[in-house]
Image: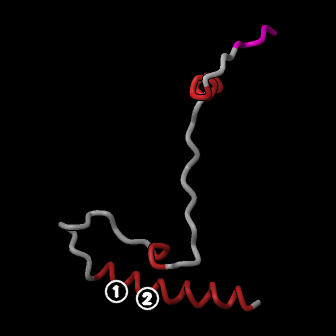
Amino acid sequence: MIDAKRRHDWQLASTLVWITAEVNRDRKRRRKPFKPDDFNPCVTTRPAPAKASVEQVASLLGAKFTKANR
C-alpha cells in the first residue's frame, strides 16, 4: 500500500515537472518532446529485444547450425 502511494505521488510530481519542462522546451534545440516518464524514477524502460535468427546466434557463438529435415 505504501509502495502504491509512493508511485502515485511520483506520477503526480512527474506530471507537474513534465508540463513545466514542455512549456519551456526550446523546440529548435530539442525537437523530441518530453514525456512524464522522463521525470519519474519509478518507471523503468526496457530496451526492445534484438531480433536475430538461430543461424545468426549460432554464428556469433562459433557453432554450426543445421536445419533438421521435416
Q: Measuring from the top left, give residue 61's x and y in whole percent.
A: 62, 28
Quarter placement of the C terminus: top right
Query: Measured along the vertical axis of the image, is residue 15 above or below residue 33?
Result: below
Three-letter code, disc 1: Thr
Q: Residues within 10 Å of mark 1 (few under 14, many from 20)?
A: few
Q: Measuring from the top left, give residue 65's x and y in whole percent.
A: 68, 17
Query: Measured along the vertical axis of the image, is residue 59 above or below residue 23?
Result: above
Query: Measured along the vertical axis of the image, is residue 61 above or below residue 48?
Result: above
Residue in view at x 32 percent, y 63 percent: 32
The residue range painted magenta reads: 66-70
Q: Main secondary structure of the magenta part?
A: loop
Quarter placement of the N terminus: bottom right
What residue does disc 1 label? 20
Q: Nearer the viewer, residue 69 or 58?
A: 58
Marks 2 and 1 close (CB-CB < 8 Å): yes
The secondary element bearing badge 2 is classed as helix
Per the model, the C-alpha gap separating discs 2 and 1 is: 6 Å
Residue in view at x 45 percent, y 73 percent: 38
Residue in view at x 40 percent, y 81 percent: 18
What residue does disc 2 label? 16
Three-letter code, disc 2: Leu
| Extreme residue in the right direction | 70
16 sits to left or right of 30: right
